[in-house]
Amino acid sequence: MAAARATQEQSERFLSMTLGGDMMPPPPAAAESGGDGDVGGGGERCVAVVVEEACCGCAQLVVGPPNPMMARYVYAFVFLATNMLAWTLRDFGHPILSELRRLRGCRGAGFCLGAEGVLRVSLGCFLFFFMMFLSTMRTRKMHDRRNSWHSEWWPAKIVLWMGFTVVPFFLPSQLIQLYGKVAHFGAGAFLVIQLVSVTRFITWLNDCCRSETNLKRCHMQVQVVSIGAYVGSILGVVLMYVWYAPRPTCKLNILFITVTLVLVQLMTAISLSSKVKAGYLAPGLMGVYIVFLCWTAIRSEPHTEICNKRAEVATSADWVNIASFVIGVIVIVTATFATGIDSKCFQFKKAESEQPEDDDIPYGFGFFHFVFAMGAMYFAMLFVSWNANQRMERWTIDVGWASTWVRVVNEWLAAIVYIWMVIAPVVWKGRQVSSSPECT
C-alpha cells in the first residue's frame, strides 16, 4: 500500500514537472482517503465544474459581450414557454377565461374560449418576434448596435414579451377572430419556409457527399445510408397500408399512401436520370421525409375515423396522447429553431466574390425573428387544428380534417420543391441556381 502511494506521488510529481507546474496538488482530504473517497471526490468536483460553467455561461449571457449563438437558445426557450402557456389556457384555462368580459362574444362556448385563449397568446408572441424582426433586419456585422439589442437587454425584452402577451387579452373578440384568419396564411408561410430549408439541406448534404474530396472516402457510407433510407421509405409505405388502409373502403387513405409511393418513385427516377445525376442519397432522404409527412397527415385524422386503427390505441391509453403531445411541442420548437438559423435557405444566387468575413453575424437576425413570428401563428393553428370553431380534446395537437389536408398538401409541395431544385440547373444551364455552401 505504501509502495503504491509512493509510486502515485512520483507520477504526479513527474506530470507536474512536465506540464510546467500547472497541475495543482490534490486536496489533503482526497490524498489521505482511500479509493472510494477518490471516486466520490472526483464526482463532486465534476458536478462543481459543470455548475460553475453553467453559471458562468448565464452570467456571460446577462453581463458579458453580445453572444448571438447563446441568444438563440433564450429565444427558443421564450417560444417554448409561450407554447406551454397557450396549451394550459386551452386545456385548463376555461374557468379563468370565462371570467373575462372581453371574451363574452363566445357566448360561453368551451371550444371558443379555449381557441381564443390560444389565439391571444399566439398574437402576443407574434407581436414580440415581429417587433424584433423589424428592429434587427438587415444586420450584417457583429459591431452593429442591433447585435447588442438582439443578444443582450434581456430584462427589457422579457418585460416586452410579458406585455405583448397580456395586451391581446384586452382586445375585442372580433379582432382576435380576424387574427385567426390571418394566422392561416402565416402558418402556411412557415410550412413553406420549413420545407424549403429541409429540402435545401438534403440537396446540400448530397452535393457535399458527392464532391471530389468526399466521394472516395465516404462512398460506402453514402451507399449504405441511401439504401437504408430508400428501404425505410418503402417499409413505411407498407406499414401505412397495413395500419391505415385495412379495407378497400378506406379510399382516402389509400389515395394518400399511393400518391406518396408514386412521389418516392418519381423523385428517385428524376434524380437518377442521365441529365440530372443527383445520386441515391438525396431521393432516399426525401423519400423518408415525405413518408413521414404522409404519416403525420393520416395521424391527424379525427379519432372517430374507422380506418385509423392506431387512433383506437391513442384514445384508449392516456399516456400515448400525453407522449404524442409532448413530442409534438418539442418538434414545433425544434423545427422553428432549426429553420430560423438557416437564413440562407432562400438565397438562390450567390456572387462568386462574396466571401464571409470574421465580423459577419453567424446567422440572419431578421430572418430568425421572422421565422419565429410565423411559428407563433403555426403553433396556434396546430393547437386549434386549423379551425377555431371545433372543440379540441385534452392532450391532443393538430387533430382534424383541416390539419390532415394541410399536411398532405405540404407533403406534395415538398416533393415539387425537391424536383424543381434538382432539375433547375438543367433547365437554366446559364444561371447559377441554389448555390450550395462549401463542404467543410
Image: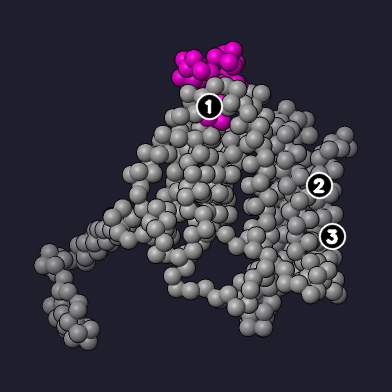
Question: Does 236 sit left or right of 56 as displayed?
Answer: right
Label 3: which residue?
266
| The C terminus, quarter of image | bottom right
- Amino acid type assigned to the residue bearing label 2 in the image: Ile
Mark positioned earlier in the residue sequence (1 or 2)? 1
Image quarter for residue 187?
Answer: top right
Label 2: which residue?
257
- Give the number of callouts: 3
Report x, y in % for residue 326.
53, 40
Alpha carbons under labels 3 and 2: distance apart: 14 Å
Q: Compare residues 130 and 286 and report the one nearer the observer.
A: 130
- Amino acid type assigned to the residue bearing label 1 in the image: Gly
Q: Which residues are magenta?
A: 93-120
Question: Does 388 sit left or right of 323 as displayed?
Answer: right
Question: Does 97 sit left or right of 18 as displayed?
Answer: right
Label 1: which residue?
117
- Label ID, residue 224: none
- Measured along the vertical axis of the image, is residue 344 above or below residue 2? above
- Please check the rendered image and state whether residue 114 is part of the magenta-colored stretch, yes or no: yes
Report x, y in % for residue 152.
36, 53
Image quarter for residue 226?
Answer: bottom right
- Please rate how many residues cluster around mark 3, counting C-alpha atoms within 10 Å: few if below 14, some from 14 to 19, many from 20: some
**What colour scheme was applied to this rendering of the protein?**
one colour
- Amino acid type assigned to the residue bearing label 3 in the image: Leu
Q: Compare residues 111 and 106 and report the one nearer the observer.
A: 106
Mark positioned earlier in the residue sequence (1 or 3)? 1
- Residue at the limit of the structure toward the top, as seen here: 107
The mark lying in front, picked from 1 and 2, is 1
Regarding residue 384, the answer to whether it shows in the image is: no
Q: Compare residues 385 and 165 and report the one nearer the observer.
A: 165
- Classify mark 1: helix, strand or loop: helix
- Measured along the vertical axis of the image, is residue 393 above or below residue 334? above
